[in-house]
Structure formats: C-alpha cells, structure tokens
Image: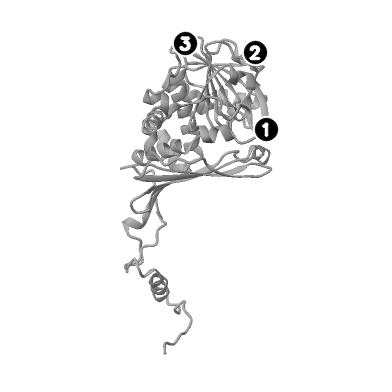
Amino acid sequence: MSGFPSDKALVPFVSVENMLALIHRCGIDRCLIELTDAIAADFARWQMFHKAPRVASHSATGVIELMPISDGVSYSFKFVNGHPSNVKRELQTVTAFGVLASVATGYPKLFSEMTLLTALRTAATSALATRMLARSDSSTAAIIGNGAQSEFQIRALAAVCGITSFRLYDIDKLATQRCVANLSGTALKLKVCGCVEAAIEGADVVTTCTADKSHQTILTDNLVGAGVHVNAIGGDCPGKTELHRDVLLRSDIFVEHAEQTRIEGDIQQLDPDHPVTEIWEVMAGVAPGRIRADQITVFDGVGFAIEDFSALRWLWSAVQDTTVTEQLDLIADPDDPRDLFGMIRRYSERNGSNSPSTASTIN
C-alpha cells in the first residue's frame, strides 16, 4: 500500500472560496437561471423522490435541521441551522453544508459549503414560483426584509422573471442601505421605503424574507390587493409566521411539500385540511396555477430537500473539468476492503512506531 488515497477515496469539496470562484466564473445571473431550471426539472419528476419532512432540533435560540432526500440514484442531505439571534453575535443566522452521494455505493460524490448555495437556491425557488404564479406583466416587486437573503432574491427575480423595479423596506435601515450598496452598478431600479405600506404600493410581487422566530404580521389583509403574488419565504419553523391569517384565506396557496409546510409555514395558522396546491402539481398540469388576473397567489416557501438536491446536482455538474474543488481524503481505502484494521498497522509500521494492538497470544 502506497500510503496515499486512491482516486476513488477522494471526494471533491467545494469550499466557500471555491463557491465564490464559481459564481465569479459563471456570473450570478447565469447561476440563478441554471439553478431555477434545475429545481424545475426535479419538481417535474416529484414522484420519483423518496420524501420526508426535515428532521429538526429546536432550541430557545434557533433550530438545527437535517434535510435528506433521494431519487433512487443519488442521495443528498443538508445540515442547516437557523438562529436569528446570531446577528447580535456578528454571526450568520443561517449556515449550511451538504453532501451528494451515490445510492449504488453509498459513497459521497460531492461535499460542499451550502451557506451561499442555499441563498442561491432559495432565491431560485422564489423566482420559479413567481415565474409560475405571478401575472405575466409583473414589473415591480416589494422586498420586505433586507437581510442576507434580499440581494439574492432581487437578482433572481430580475434574471429569471425580468422584474427590474424593486421597493425595499426593513425595520433596520442599515440593512436596506447595505442591500442598495451591494446592488449598486446594476441596471435595477431600487427605491428605499419608510414603511411596509409604502413598499407594497404599486408592487405586483411581494417577497417577505424576515428572520424573527415568532408570529409576526408583516402583511395585513388590507395591504394585499387583487392580482398580487406573494412569496412568503422568511426563515420558517413552528410558531414563526409572516402573513396575517386573513391574507391566506383570500388567497390561492402554493407550497413545496404540504406535510412540511403545515408544520413550519404560514399555513400553520389554518385548519389542517385547508386546501393548498403543491407546485409540482402545477408543473405536471394536474392542478391550475394562476387562472385570473385579479387572483391573489401565495407561495408559502419553507425550503424543501429537493431544492438542495437540485442545487447539489447542479453544482456537481458545474464543477466538472474546473479547478474550483479540493480533493478530500474522506473515505478509508484499504487494499483489501475487508482489512480496515490493516491500515492502522501499516501506518504504524511506516512511521516507525509499535503496533497499535496490545500483545496477545493464541492458544
């Protein structure tokens, strides 16, 4: 044994630096468009996936979740947290990493940071829902909550849906200023608003992306006019909502996976049997999307594992034949698969130390 891992034991790793390099290389608009199409393609084959609600561990300060899924050929999971109070510690409120693996062997094919990738895929999912459900003449969007997700949401709505005018509001004025500064130099029209009401005025699409882990009324019933499409995509969990119940009762509601959204989304406020439509049904043509110009549509997006699967699948393809990965020695690779302990013995022998085993005798 050479002491060096073979190619089959090395796992490509996309670090934060790698991800930044890939986004720079491809361009963020291209990344968002391709991610949107990848998510759409996987939702179109919804019934091929083994699906389950995420596994969540809640605490007083936040939540840590595992999000697994498989289509029978590949398997993925994401480890992700949501801690709104992290801002006070100068930490990210959401961080993540993920793995894409082969079902046939169980070996990981890709290991990646997913803090940036989750922001991209969340924005791509909002853009997909908007492309499906908003009026085709939509040109102005309100972004309520201008934290870490806002710039991604804006760029995705612009790249995928052609929306170019944005009205911004956040209770934290510095957050809005930062959002505007980050998007300077683009052709986007950005208007800073002093209240929710001003931001929503004239908006065809409203995206709420707040982070408080509590029941909030970001949108009251009187604020949502006929024909508006709402993306309610703020960090969701039991006990955390953004829309007033009456808004939901006046709207046609679309979700990713109803079983999960009834636990974590804005629809947790409604009766358990209140009708909702999963977006794959619209894509498959088995349920209608928008059918009237004056219809109010709500995408109650909580994030679902298929979107992470799509993002990792897209990333796997995007990094092929590039230098934006590192090779991790992650999988033990003995010469004989049945001789795992032998790796320890041979390492000790090569490094001039005694055998790791204690003396023994066989009678």
Direction front: furthest residue? 273
Reading the image, the residue beneath label 3 is 292
Residue 226 versus residue 78 in the image, above or below? above
Q: Secondary structure at mark 2?
A: helix
Q: Residue at x 47, y 37 (%)?
A: 117
Reading the image, the residue beneath label 2 is 222
Location of residue 230 in the rendering, given as x and y in whole percent from the top left corner: 54, 20
Location of residue 29 in the rendering, given as x and y in whole percent from the top left corner: 42, 26
User: Mark 3 or mark 2, which is nearer the start of the sequence?
Assistant: 2
Does any portion of residue 115 appear in the rendered image?
A: yes
> How busy is the neighbourhood of tag 1: few (under 14 within 10 Å), some, or many (20 plus)?
few
The quadrant of the picture occupied by the C terminus is bottom left
Q: Secondary structure at mark 1?
A: loop
Mark seen at residue 214: 1
Location of residue 170 in the rendering, given as x and y in whole percent from the top left corner: 64, 23
Q: Residue at x 43, y 45 (%)?
A: 76
Direction bottom: furthest residue? 363
Image-quadrant location for residue 175: top right
Image-quadrant location for residue 224: top right
Residue contact at pointers 2 and 3, CB within 8 angstroms = no
Residue 34 versus residue 297 in the image, above or below? below
Nearest the camera: 342 or 193? 342
**What's under tag 3, amino acid-wise?**
Arg
**What's under tag 1, amino acid-wise?**
Ser
